[in-house]
Image (cartoon, rainbow, N blue to C red):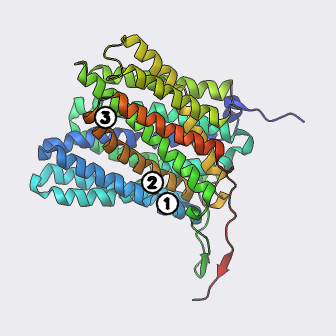
Amino acid sequence: MAQPMSGVKGLMRVPGLPQLFLWSMLGRLNVSALPIALSLMLVRWSNSYVVVGLVGCALTLGQGAAGPLRGRAADRGSTVRLLVITGVGYTTGLAVIVTLAARAPASSWPVVVVVALVTGLSAVPVSQISRAVWPKIVGSELTSTLYTAEATASEVITTTGPLLASLVIAVAGPYWAVGVTALLALVSALVFAAALGRAGVGGEPLPQRGERLAQRSLLTEGPFVRVVAISMLVTAAIFAVNLSVVAWTQNIGRPALAGVLTACWTAGSLAGGFALSTFARELPRALRVAGMAVGMAALAVLLPPVLGTVPLWLVVVVLFLGGTAIAPTLAATYEQIAEASPEDRRAEAFGWMATATAGGGALSAALTGVLLDFSGPALPVAAGAALVFVALVLTVFGRKPRAPSAETVEEVTA
């Protein structure tokens, strides 16, 4: 009997997977496109970056708070229905924000903050649903490869979204850019829902009335909490490097380099993800995390105040080489989240991961700002390396995740 194909070629031969994967990626494009469009629209309306920050914070808090709840709804009911409901709700919320910014006076910004919070609660859970269903579609042999491909493709989406928003802003303005982003969120949610339905993984019946699941919280499982902590630490470190690179280019009077250097880091991540999927699928997770820590530590040594001046090409090389560990490390966290949660609660598990990464990013942004003002870009990058080192310790010495079994379904009478 022929052995199943592994690697990218094996993924391409899974019926319906290429289309489903494509739509899952396009379903995330609005997430990376929205910040620049929303920020420019709000600052033109209110002439205040404080308002921009408050609205962005409210949107992020809503997304983070609702992550586990949306995941639980996906686990217990129809993911197709959930995608349609959240797609409509999220698009409506953004449309209300655009309308208020176009018609209402700037003094009504508190209303926009409240609407942003509600909109965040309705964010479309494309990423957590797709990560939860991948093992069902491809089986255990290809799950690792698929998570690596997702982490790699996500880097492309993260880069493409701001470019798309910038193009629409240049042609029609930020109000239209937010509108296009909202429409993109709705269309991609509907198409992804249809693709899930065709694949037979999105139409599970909702629990019958009179039934409830007697389940413990996933946060009571030590291995699961450890993996969520690893994800939060890695995300916080990535945020620290991104902000520090931008600050460094501003300090040397060459702000245009920020995009170039970020692109080099992203290119390294793409190369690392491709290499892992093609040549090194069995690379231990600890080595991936260690590579990320070493890359960040090397970058910290090159930045002020450790070194006053350094050749630009050397920074580019270090960013690229350090970036090769990003996609493999993110893929490792996805694998561990899937392993540490039962199959019927994986969407909820990835919801907790979304909450943790949102919190890690927010805390990292605040801490990085303080460290940049205090010392310079080397210190926050070094702090990011230290966070990844902690993640490495948790990866090496933590107990291997084992999916906890779901508790018994109990019948209750009305």
Residue 380, picture quadrant: top left
Q: Residues within 10 Å of mark 2 (few under 14, many from 20)?
A: many
Amino acid, disc 1: Pro
Q: Earlier in the sequence, mark 2 or mark 1?
A: 1
Residue at 68%, 34% in the rendered image: 284
Q: Residue 378: x and y, percent?
A: 36, 27
Q: Nearer the viewer, residue 1 or 339?
A: 339
Residue type indicated by callout 3: Ala
Task: Point out the tag, 2 or 3, that comes first from the N-terminus.
Answer: 3
Residue nearest the observer in this picture, 311 or 62? 311
**Residue at the bottom extreme?**
414
Find numbered disc 3 in the image and state the secondary structure of the residue it sits on: helix
Mark 2 vs 1: CB contact within 8 A: yes
Q: Which residue is mark 3?
A: 165
Note whether 389 is above or below 347 in the view shown: above
Per the image, the residue denoted by label 2 is: 355
Residue at image mark 1: 68
